[in-house]
Amino acid sequence: MALPAYYTTKDKLWHYAFRVICFAIFFFLLAPILIMIPLSFNAQPYFTFTREMLTLNPDGYSLRWYQDFLASDSWMRSIRNSFGIGIAATLVSTFLGTLAALGLSRSEMPAKGLIMGILISPMIVPLIISAAGMFFFFSSINIAQTYLGVVLAHAALGTPFVVITVTATLVGFDHSLTRAAANLGASPTRTFFKITMPLILPGVISGALFAFITSFDEIVVVLFVAGVEQRTIPREMWSGIREDISPTILAVATILVMVSIALLTVVELLRRRGERMRGLSPQ
Amino acid sequence: MGVRWFYWCHEKSGIPPTHGEISVSASEKRDGFVVFDGVQKSYDGETLVVKDLNLSVARGEFLTMLGPSGSGKTTCLMMLAGFETATHGEILLDGSPINSVPPHKRGIGMVFQNYALFPHMTVGENLSFPLEVRGLGKSDREKKIMRALDMVQMGAFANRRPAQLSGGQQQRIALARALVFEPELVLMDEPLGALDKQLREHMQFEITRLAHELGITTVYVTHDQTEALTMSDNVAVFDDGRIQQLDPPDVLYEAPCNSFVAQFIGENNTLDGVVKEIKGETCIVELDGGEVIDAKPVNVTKVGDRTTVSIRPERVEANKDRLDPEAHTIKAEVKEFIYMGDVFRTRLKVAGNENFIMKTRNAPDQVRHKPGDMIEIGWMPTDCRALDHA
């Protein structure tokens, strides 16, 4: 793009300096993540680039850490745990969060601000405090170190995301649509499933994805509440770093980055679809 | 039409009502297809938005509720649709009370102000919705949908989404959706408010044509008096939570029964004065400036009453030959002459009122007054109505 003709030398200098600064910020944010990806293909058990890698010699690269990862029972268990706990916690928090948001959007609901504050408090309270609280509470009711305990703990952390995204979707919801549905003869239940639900679905799904990601990369609560059987991927990585330093972690991290990118892409596509739907309403 | 109503206007005015009866027994009162019987509505438990509403709409009638915003007309419509509950009184549909019937069991069609088309469904699916709810089979549904779409000339649009349609097209679809399940009663809440003038006029015609062809009963809410006058069989003028007058459009315009209605419907000249003499169908009013005019007593009862007389601009006459020789005339000063093509609009100063308008037809012999001219104007005593003092 050509610079405007009226630019002075100083303006031009700034123009380029600005781009350099922006690039530097992106580098700062992304370099630690991106550097893992080539390193995960290292043929040697090091966390540094070998000479072969730097000269792009194919012998310097291998998939051995990925094979290691796939062959390891404890890693496989952690994957099953992460997805199992993540999906179960997502279902619970999506169900509860959507119901809460629907209730909070009704005009006759009293003390909305207070209830909203309580519901989203798990997001605001430092995680270590929630985790410690849950540890003592779950121990006293004997669900610490069980799948149920971890799922409930993660559901509590994920619910605020669902409440917030669904509430935001409902702000733009045209309530004359539910009236129209009633007028056309649909019972409240039918109206909910045929009219309300399809229209707020993008908000529900993006809330569910946030809840899933929250559970998927959560470690603090898992450290407190989970036993050996419930170890998730982050928990397994954590002991991997502390106990045996192996580049398998890099392979796992690369896979997790890919999963996260995929999920966030879905969120973004849904958000766009939601906006298009919103644009469809006549106002 | 079969509307019967019982508003104080006729009793007080002393003029025979143009339709209906003055006193209606309780059983007759409940004869209509839609009946509001002593309905009151309050949102906060203190102020009444609707105060003692009594109204009966006959089968097949097109009734318009007309009034300024906040007059209670939309609340009445919402009570009829079931989205609001009456605080007091009863609403009857075809003889049975519907106060405790939920909205989805009333079977009333409705066109919403913002159309309320379902954005995630196509036009066809929007129309199919009320039919699916009623458990109709696929072929029946398709037949009815096509018929309803053809009725509003939108047959080619069944697969479009509402957002792909213009405002006027969305309006037609909303109308088709309200009619597709063949309700006997259709409610319309300012359905033409968002359309431009030309389209609005066209749709006014379309809606009245459909309503009469299908023989449905229509309750139409608007704040646009032109819409009310051109479309309705009867118009209920709302103000302050009450029906101020309920009459066919021509009666409403020519014989308003109080100052509010006279001011609200059409253009109106007012002059303030005191009643000097009442002789049956005419009375003499002495204006505040001392001038004396003839008027028809509408809701003044005795000599000495303060009154606001109301005269329509097109009933003011400047040509003495067309006036009754006995009629009182009054001096007027021409302030402004506006040429409007089909009519001339002359702004006069009459008895201190500088905004007295006279509308005359553009005819070859019509005088075009100049500002500053002193003229004498008069009117038929029947066109000058002595109303309550506003």
Image: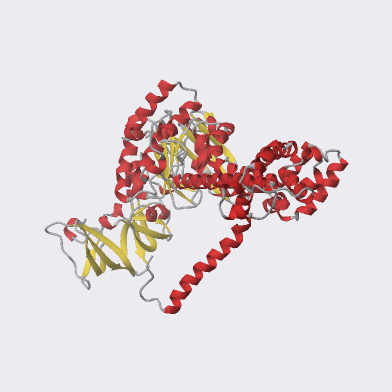
Corner quadrant of residue B358? bottom left
Query: Residue A126 or B57: which is nearer the viewer?
Result: A126
**Which residue is outermost to the left?**
B364
**Quadrant including the C terminus of chain B:** bottom left
Image x and y of residue B223, in percent: 41, 50
Q: Which of the pair B199/B377 is nearer the observer?
A: B199
The N terminus of chain B appears in which quarter of the rendering? Answer: top left
Q: Quadrant of residue A70?
A: top right
Can residue B255 be seen here?
A: no
User: Looking at the picture, how far across and down is residue B255, in whole percent?
Assistant: 35, 49
Q: Which of B207 and B276 is in front in this view?
A: B207
With respect to residue B289, does B235 lie above or below? above
The residue located at (19%, 67%) in the rendering is: B369
Residue furthest toward the right? A140
Q: Position of residue B196 (x, y in %)?
A: 33, 50
User: Does A118 sit above or below residue B347?
Assistant: above
Which residue is drawn at the image coordinates 32% and 32% (left, top)? B155
Q: Is residue B303 visible?
A: yes
Q: In this view, does B278 lie above or below A16?
A: above
- Relative horizontal placement of residue B86, taking residue A215 as reference (left or right): left
Q: How many marks?
A: 0
